[in-house]
Each structure stands twice: as C-alpha cells, then as structure tokens.
Amino acid sequence: MRWALVKVSLAVTAMVVVAFAVPLGLVIREMARDRAFSNAEREAAAVAPALSITTDREQLERVVASAGSDAGMAVHIPASASGSGADTDTDAGTGTGGPTDIGRQRATDEDIAAVREMGRASTTEVGGGSTLLQPVALSSGEIAVVEVYVPESEVTNGVGTAWAVLAAVGAALIVGSVAVADRLGVRMVQPARRLVEGAHELGEGKLGSRVPVEGPNELRRAAVAFNSMADQVVQLLANERELAADLSHRLRTPLTVLRLNAASLGDGPAAEQTRAAVEQLEREVDTIIRTARDAKPQTAAAGPGAGCDAAEVVRERMGFWSALAEDEGRKWRVAGADRPVRIPVARTDLAASLDALLGNVFRHTAEGTAFAVDLHNGEDAVIVLVSDAGPGIPDPEAAMARGRGSGTDGSTGLGLDIVRRLAESTGGDVRIGSSVLGGTEVRIWIQLDGRTAPVRQRGHRGAVRRRRHPRTGSTFNRPRSLP
C-alpha cells in the first residue's frame, strides 16, 4: 500500500509538472525573443529622426554610433535620396556609386527592396541570428531601411537559466509529493503491520498481545475489534480451563470410592497392582486439575536441559502394561530402551502418550495380539514406534482427526491427539502406517534441535504413512525382567 501511494503520487505530480512546465518554458522562450526584437526596434527608432532630417553620411554615422554600433546596425538609403557626399563615396557598402549603405549589410538586397515596397518592418533569418528591417520615410519621400542585427545569443538570453529553474522547481515538487505520499503511506501501513503482528502473536499463543488503536478510522476500528476478539479468546480459554478443572474435580468422588474398595482387596499381586493403578489415576487427575487452573500454557520442556529419559519412561510403562499383557496372553517386546535417551519432553507427557497408544492396543485388538515398543535414538531426533499385530486402522486420516472417534467402540478420538501434540511441541510429527507384525504402527518423531512445530496444510492432524517401515526381524518373547 505504501509503495502504491508513492507511485500514484509520483505519476500525478509528474503529469502536472509536465503540463505546466512545458508551456511555460515555451512562453519564456517567446518572451526572450520578443524582448530582443523590442530592443532592436528601439535602436532602429533612435535613427529614424535623424533620417527624416538629413541623409548626410557623416552625420548618420555619428547617429548610428550613438544608437548602437556599426557591427550591429546598418542604414540603407536609396541612391536618389543620397546627398552629394553619398554620391561620390565609392567605399561604402558595395563600393559603387549606388545607394548609400552605412554599416555592415547582412540582409539580402531582395529583402531590403521588399521592405521598401511593403513599407512595414520585417524580420529575416541570417547567419548567426536574425535581422530587423525597419523602413523610415525620408524628407524626399523615399524609403530608407534601418537594419538591426539580433544575434541568436541575445534571442535565447536567459532562456536556459529559466528552464533550469523550472526543472528544479518541478523536481522539487515531485520529490515533495513523493515524501508526503510516503509519510501518508507509513501512517496507513504501520497500523496495518501492527495488526498483522498482533494476529501472528495471538496465533502463537501470546494471549496478552494487543494492538494500539491508531491510524485511519478504518484501521482504528479494526484494532478495536481485534482487541475485543483477543479479550474474548482469553475469556473463553479461561472458561475452558475452569470447565476442565471442574470436570476433573468431579472424578475425585468415584476415585475415593475406588481407592477404598481397592484397599479392601487384601494382599496379593493383583490387589497391589489395582491399588497402584488407582494411585496413579489420582495423580493424573490432580495433574489435570493443576494444569487447567494454571493461566499459563504448559510447554513440553521448560528450558535447556529440561526433559526426561525416554528409555526409563518406556521401561516403566511397559512394566505396568506387562501384567495386563500376561493376563491376556499377549507377546510383547521392548527394543532400544537399554541405554539413556534424553528428549526435550516432560516425563508425564511421554508417559501419557505411551499409555494412550498402548491402551488403544489393548482396547482395539483381540486378546493374544502381540505388540512391541521400539526406541530409536538419532542425531537430531528420537523415534518411538508402537506396533501391533492387530487388524490395523481402516481410516488412518480419520483416526488422526481430533474428536472423530466413534462412540460404538468407546473411543473419544483424543488419544492420538495427545500423542500428536507431544510430537509437534518439539517440531516433530506422528505418522500411522503398517507394521511388520501385520497391524498398525504409530511412529512418534521427536525433534532434538528445538525446531518449532511445522505448519499443517491439510485438514486432519498429523500424517499418514502408507508404506511399510523396514525393520530387522525378531521373536516376541517376554523379557525375564524389567528394571
């Protein structure tokens, strides 16, 4: 917009300058020409009184010398009106005893004769300039012609300077109009740019971003509307957090009953596992309540050095799910979790993601279906693979979309979304494909270089990978022990 205003102002001002400067330049040239010939006419008029009194050569030469100069003025007297001195003088003019010529003749005899015949002044072009031929009536009734030479330099005297001044004024007008248009453009563009920056900041999660109300009326109204929208977004998010906290708090009552019932189960491995599960469920509910009550959004990692050991979390969660897998006769395997693997993800978030994926395996596959968890540590990323030997996912794209889970199988569609948000918080992603076991493989790509999450161009969340992932074969045997 700024450059558009500058271009429009430049074009309009240039047209106005050309429309006025060109005719004015031509007028100045004509005025200079008229001035030069007016001076020539005055010089010729100064000789006319002397010619009406006498035609004596010596007296006329003195008059010509006083009026102008012999180099710029000439007097042509016909032979019949010449005095005796003029008749016997053979050096003047043509060197004959003809007409008396005083000064240097530049005009042709034909032009002089034409002026005598017409009886009015005339101008003619000669080498280096022009001449003014002024007829003067003598006392004898004859017509003498006064010739005044007007050089070209006198005709154009001051024209170049005037044109230079006009050009400078025109350039100053153009520069001034461009500067004014640029300032007006800045006054319009800066509020619009601040509005765009505020929208980007709000989209990045900076809920305190507001736009100053300034600029033209339209942009001022847009800024007021944007600030009002931002306030409403903050209020809606606050209401959502309160609602999540309230809903989570309502779970405390059934959890209390469940904990009391678990305490009455007595001793035994099953009872201990049930009590441990109830305690973990209570901790998760407390975490949800604290997170929902917190006004600041939680990030995956708090800063440099923050995060967790992915291998430790994988071993811990597989130790929890191994008991249920043993009860259902499922073969399982853990690979790549024998050495520490640091990732920029909170421990609770990674544990929640693994529980969501493993819970889907137990919920959507038949008993006895094998599954595996592989952990791959690369230079710039860590990959967590959760695969199973079940029937697979018929529509991976719909599975990645939040909230599209069908109600018939008890799925809410939020499990994969938890995993997706975990990966995208580090700049990674989640892909669904086919595993070598014949079922589904979910790949979690966690970036280690701190890149921001990529901009999604598709309507669904995450990505879908159709090809098989190459992997070395291995048998599914339960490890003898897990740390």
Image (spheres, rainbow, N blue to C red):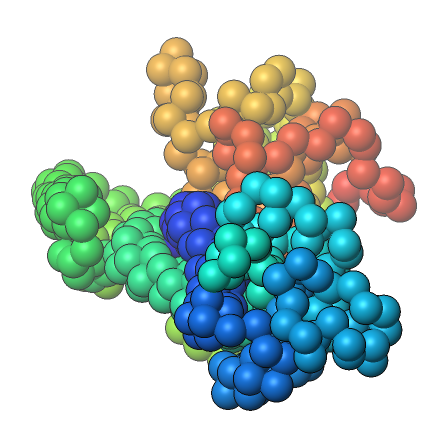
Horizontal and vertical percent position of residue 358: 54, 40
Residue at 59%, 18% in the rendered image? 395
Q: For the image shown, how many numbered marks are present on the structure?
A: 0
- Residue 440: which quarter of the image? top right
Horizontal and vertical percent position of residue 136: 50, 59
Residue at 71%, 32% in the rendered image? 465
- Residue 432: which quarter of the image? top right
For residue 336, above or below residue 11: below
Horizontal and vertical percent position of residue 225: 14, 43
User: Residue farthest to the front?
Assistant: 84
For residue 366, above or below residue 332: above
Question: Which quarter of the figure is the C terminus placed in?
Answer: bottom right
Horizontal and vertical percent position of residue 39: 46, 70
Q: Nearer the viewer, residue 38 or 324?
A: 38
Please state if 240 lies on the left or on the right of 166 as rendered: left
Residue at 58%, 60% in the rendered image? 144
User: Residue farthest to the top?
Assistant: 408
User: Residue farthest to the right?
Assistant: 472
Q: Is residue 457 visible?
A: yes
For residue 285, above or below residue 407: below
Q: Nearer the viewer, residue 255 or 327?
A: 255
Please state if 262 lies on the left or on the right of 103 as rendered: left
Residue at 50%, 69% in the rendered image? 51
Q: Nearer the viewer, residue 22 or 144?
A: 144
Please state if 89 lies on the left or on the right of 388 as rendered: right
Q: Nearer the viewer, residue 235 or 323?
A: 235
Q: Is residue 346 visible?
A: no
